[in-house]
């Protein structure tokens, strides 16, 4: 199996998702700065699902799966809510957000800045968000070869 | 997350401890609102114990920038970890708000302003 | 649904489980000292499953569910390994562990010290460990009533 | 977890940063082994940046107590958080090893011993 986490949808569970991603990336020997950015992008995407695509706390689940090959980290988020086409969303300028005194509107911008590839798939029962982040030559962990499947 | 609050003469220091994410940002927002409503306009956000911030956490500060400016106050940040600073940079916020390396750089700023 | 987390069995995922338990107990208004002890007991039990009841990393899953009522926090751990009768295990004295230069043997002792009730059930496909911790009058969180089912 | 190592004149200070659990205890154990093999017998474990410890983490220190004693060395702890100290107490370890409130209490101990 690929390393994965599944939690009930409630914002209190974002912390567990972040620690899952952080520890797994450490085990995959991903450099700290890159790892933090991936944690951030996953946190933003999961927070969006929890806030925008579900009506109530703990009434559905979200799953995150993580793996890497030589060159790339892959993230797959499966959310039981309706798929949101985040790759079509046009974020506002930060100056505009400040002027409007908005508390949000920067999550998808961050995901776009961090990830090299974003794919969204609508399935019958759930939505799949697939991210890829290139590692630009960061070596694999010593001993273990990483199983990608 | 916890928030330590230190009331200075010319400014308030807020020290968020732990992770400031979509979950804990509500608490941070309540804290800022309370301070603003009690008349505080100068804020020092001491990030030395802040382990993580997401866009929802930053949103708390961003949403109050205009009000603070209107009231001729100021909000400055200090002691941000590399990771937290990276989020400011990804958003271009490091060009918009003042960030100091250490909290000891801050008192002078408010004293002379 | 009750708040829950499911992760693939590998020690790197213990951190996610701890943060799940910690944040949920905070949302349930459980006092910090009690919450830390519950986190510790769950960590010890999950570490045991990962280390002793599985042959390989990430080849099975473990699930933790958490809820409280007025007086008690309940934990349910479902592990796809064989059930271990931890309530029958007689831990060694700490002095004995020191003398033997052992690196372990204190996990079940800690779980017993912390939890008020421990039940183990062997199911066809998995083992269930049920813990209960009494709260001795710690109040429920304000506004929300806690759903126990 | 990360481990900071500070080599003093008569003792080594190890500062585990983060969580010392069944996962990270391996790294801590390798660090202790390496120090012992290089002849170090006096250890100061500065717990001021240790956020969590489980029995596997404590096991690292416990498993070396006999060897350290045999070598006429010492291992002491300082700056433990309430939660970390609670684990020592649950196990009765607080009666067996020396724990100091602050790391500044430690140097004198090794100087006079
Ligand atoms: N999973 C989702 N389901 C439904 N709508 C979403 C989802 N993710 C994002 N959105 C919509 O896109 C907007 C922008 O998202 P984002 O940039 O993350 O900012 P924020 O969530 O802080 O508003 C949201 O306000 C919401 O209207
Ligand atoms: N889930 C489990 N499956 C199989 N054996 C177990 C399990 N949990 C505990 N054990 C056995 O009980 C012993 C004592 O467990 P514990 O007190 O947690 O100490 P440790 O795991 O550090 O050895 C273990 O060494 C192991 O032999």
Image (cartoon, coloured by chain):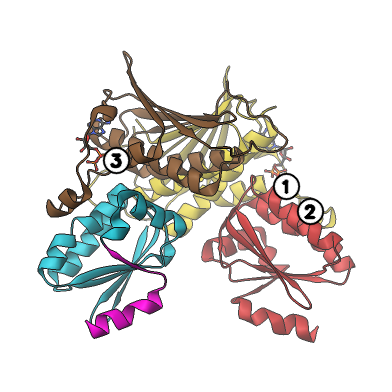
Chain colours: A yellow, B red, C brown, D cyan
Mark 1 vs mark 3, CA separation in Å: 49 Å
Does the Cβ of the disc 3 residue fall within 8 Å of ligand 2?
A: yes
Specify the quadrant of the image occupied by residue C28.
Answer: top right
Q: Is C61 placed above or below D103 here?
A: above
What residue is pinned by disc 1? A105
User: Any magenta on residue D100?
Assistant: yes
Q: Is C113 placed above or below D70 here?
A: above
Specify the quadrant of the image occupied by residue C69.
Answer: top right
Disc 2 secondary structure class: helix
Camera-near label (1 vs 3) is 3
Position of the C terminus of chain B by quadrant: bottom right
Residue drawn at (43%, 44%), measured in percent from left and top? C37
Q: What residue range appears in magenta?
A: D97-113
Contact between marks 2 and 1 (CB within 8 A): the answer is yes
Q: State the residue in front, D102 or A142.
A: D102
Does the Cβ of the disc 2 residue fall within 8 Å of ligand 1?
A: no
Residue D30: horizontal and vertical position, in percent? Answer: 21, 59
Q: Does the rendering let one see residue A141?
A: no
Side (left or right) of D9 relative to C26: left
Residue drawn at (24%, 59%), measured in percent from left and top? D61
What residue is pinned by disc 3? C109
Residue drawn at (53%, 45%), measured in percent from left and top? A15
What residue is pinned by disc 2? A97
């Amino acid at each position: 199996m690929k390393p994965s986490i599944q939690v009930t949808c409630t914002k209190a569970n974002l912390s567990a998702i972040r620690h899952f991603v952080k520890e797994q990336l450490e085990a995959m020997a991903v450099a700290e700065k890159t790892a933090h950015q991936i944690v951030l992008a996953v946190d933003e995407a999961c927070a969006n699902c929890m806030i925008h695509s579900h009506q109530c706390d703990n009434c559905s689940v979200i799953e995150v799966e993580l793996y890497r090959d030589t060159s790339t980290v892959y993230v797959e988020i499966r959310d039981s809510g309706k798929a949101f086409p985040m790759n079509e969303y046009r974020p506002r300028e930060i100056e505009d957000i400040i002027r409007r005194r908005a508390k949000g509107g920067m999550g998808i911008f961050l995901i776009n800045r961090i990830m090299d590839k974003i794919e969204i798939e609508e399935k019958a029962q759930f939505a799949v968000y697939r991210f890829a982040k290139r590692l630009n030559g960061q070596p694999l962990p010593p001993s273990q070869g990483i199983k990608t499947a | 997350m916890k928030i330590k609050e230190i009331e200075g003469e010319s400014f308030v220091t807020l020290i968020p401890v732990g992770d400031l994410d979509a979950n804990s940002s509500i608490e941070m927002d309540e804290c800022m609102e309370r301070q603003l409503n009690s008349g505080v306009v100068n804020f020092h956000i001491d990030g030395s114990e802040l382990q993580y911030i997401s866009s929802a956490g930053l949103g708390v500060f961003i949403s109050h920038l205009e009000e603070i400016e209107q009231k001729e106050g100021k909000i400055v940040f200090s002691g941000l970890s590399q990771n937290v600073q990276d989020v400011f940079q990804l958003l271009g916020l490091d060009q918009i708000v003042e960030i100091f390396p250490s909290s000891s750089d801050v008192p002078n700023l408010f004293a002379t302003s």
